Amino acid sequence: MKNTIYLFLFFCCSISFCQGQKLKTTVLDTKELENKTYIGFDGLGNNYYIKDNVFSKQNESQTWEYKNVALGKITSVDYVNPLKIVIFYEDFNTIITLDNQLNEIQKLNLFDIDNTIFASKIGMASQNQFWIYNALTQQIMLFDYLKNTSKAIGNPIQENIKYTQSDFNNFYWIDDINNWYAIDIFGKVTLLANIPPFEKIQIIDNEKLLFSRDNILYSLNNQTKVVHEIEIVEKSFQNYYYKDQILAIFTNQQIKNYKIKLP
């Protein structure tokens, strides 16, 4: 009865979406997590972790590590391009790029380049650029890391941002009232949807995303306006990651990989 009431209230809050059938999954494998934070995986068979502020990359035969204690805590890691991994240290306004063996390629202290850039979000963009959300001006910027030049695109964002994500061509953000936006590298801003309340979220592309609430995982399709609950065996989980029809669910102790095709 409690779940029925919850689902009714849940979908009343997002009236533009309707509920579809529960999505079935197939368990592929389970791995022990060994007391570290799992970030996700790439399309080359590598898994990424952080433990004691050390970033590591691991496949079936090898492990690589990167640490930089002088820069404090790792804020975020972007491996949209697994051959050029981006680590952001917000406390020092510094971006580190690594090669596929986690050797340092470039170190950029943004204060040394432009003291008006106070980055709070970083991501890899196309054409030798980073996405930057400048907390000082509340604007999204593109930073050319070969020329050390930057440009603001779009207007300042008026609402508070609660989540961001990016790929080569788009920077996404979700504001305090759950409006989901995208801006492309040319500065075109698109309001994609107003989405249901969430606790954790992963944007797949400009049509699909995953979100969780009360340890239930859902997929949302912005084009069909349908939300599906995803069938998993975990009663509780820390986070999840989806790529190439593989869904990784991770708890404190393990990672379980499922096969699923999102509608």
Image (tube, helix red, strand yellow):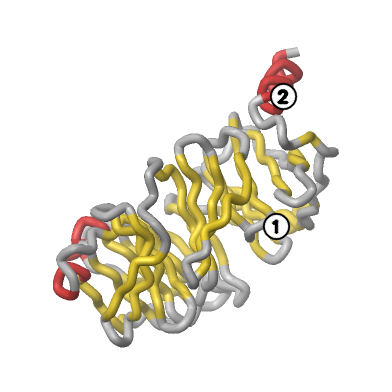
How many neighbours does mark 2 have within 10 angstroms: few (below 14), some (14-19), or many (20 or more)? few
Dot 2 corresponds to which residue?
7
> Is 136 drawn above or below residue 226 in the view shown?
below
Dot 1 corresponds to which residue?
29
Q: Mark 2 is on which residue type?
A: Leu
Q: Residue 150: percent from the left, percent from the top?
A: 30, 74
Q: Residue 27: percent from the left, percent from the top?
A: 76, 52
Relative horizontal placement of residue 24, taking residue 70 as reference (left or right):
right
| Distance from the alpha carbon under mark 1 to that under mark 2 | 30 Å
Q: Mark 1 is on which residue type?
A: Asp
Question: For the point 51% across and 56% down, which residue is it?
Answer: 172
| Mark 1 element type | strand
Q: Is residue 76 visible?
A: yes
Quadrant in which residue 43 is drawn: bottom right
Report the mark closest to the observer, 1 or 2.
2
Question: For the point 44% across and 53% down, which residue is it?
Answer: 37
The residue nearer to you, when weighing 76 against 252, is 76
Q: Is residue 166 visible?
A: no
Question: For the point 74% across and 42% down, which residue is it?
Answer: 230
The label shown at residue 3 is: none
